[in-house]
């Protein structure tokens, strides 16, 4: 398990343990974290699981694939540090990861 902290746009934090090999999106959905709708179920076909990744974690997560980058081009409030949480696999190196949600995903 890795401890992931999800931060809503208003600053509310939710720290949960997510099993290795689950996605960051699955961790949010399985723990009832508001703001990660995941309308496509993790198929990288929407951007309702967009999160912002702090600089420290970007190198550990690695770059987005072409398909993810294409989806992020249409995401509301996308930034250079935006990622789709369905595309981030949890592993031991991500223990302590903090992800922040954009305003467009407020509940």
Image: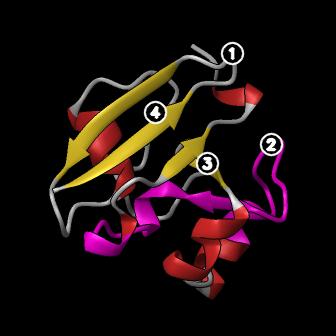
Percent from the top left, x then y, of residue 103?
75, 26
Q: Quadrant of the N terminus?
A: bottom left
Inter-mark Cα distance, 3 to 1: 14 Å
Task: Estimate how packed mark 1 is, as few (under 14), some (14 to 19) or many (20 or more) residues with alpha carbons within 10 Å.
Answer: few
Q: Residue drawn 45% across and 21% down?
A: 34
Which element is circle 1 on? loop
The reply to whether callout 4 and callout 3 are in contact (CB within 8 Å) is: no
Q: Residue drawn 75% across and 50% down?
A: 75
19 on left or right of 77: left
Q: Which residue is mark 3?
A: 51
- The residue lying toward the viewer, choosing from 30 and 55, is 55
Q: Which residue is mark 4?
A: 37
Does the magenta run of residues contain 81?
yes
- The residue lying toward the viewer, choosing from 47 and 97, is 97
Inter-mark Cα distance, 2 to 1: 17 Å
Q: Quadrant of residue 105?
A: top right
The magenta segment? 70-93
Inter-mark Cα distance, 4 to 3: 12 Å
Mark in front: 3 vs 2: 3
Which color mode does the image show?
secondary structure
Q: Residue drawn 56% across and 83% down?
A: 62
The circle on residue 76 is 2
Percent from the top left, x then y, of residue 74?
79, 56
The reply to whether callout 4 and callout 1 are in contact (CB within 8 Å) is: no
- Earlier-in-chain disc, 4 versus 3: 4
The circle on residue 10 is 1
- Earlier-in-chain disc, 4 versus 1: 1
- Earlier-in-chain disc, 4 versus 2: 4
Q: Quadrant of residue 28?
A: top left
């Amino acid at each position: 398990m890795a401890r992931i902290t999800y931060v809503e746009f208003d600053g509310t934090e939710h720290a949960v343990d997510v099993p290795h090999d689950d996605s960051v999106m699955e961790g949010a959905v399985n723990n009832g974290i508001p703001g990660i709708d995941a309308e496509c179920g993790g198929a990288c076909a929407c951007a309702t699981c967009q999160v912002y990744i702090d600089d420290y974690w970007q190198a550990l997560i690695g770059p987005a694939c072409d398909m993810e980058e294409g989806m992020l081009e249409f995401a509301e409030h996308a930034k250079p540090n935006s990622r789709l949480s369905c595309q981030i696999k949890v592993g031991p190196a991500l223990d302590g990861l903090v992800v922040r949600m954009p305003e467009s995903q407020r509940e």
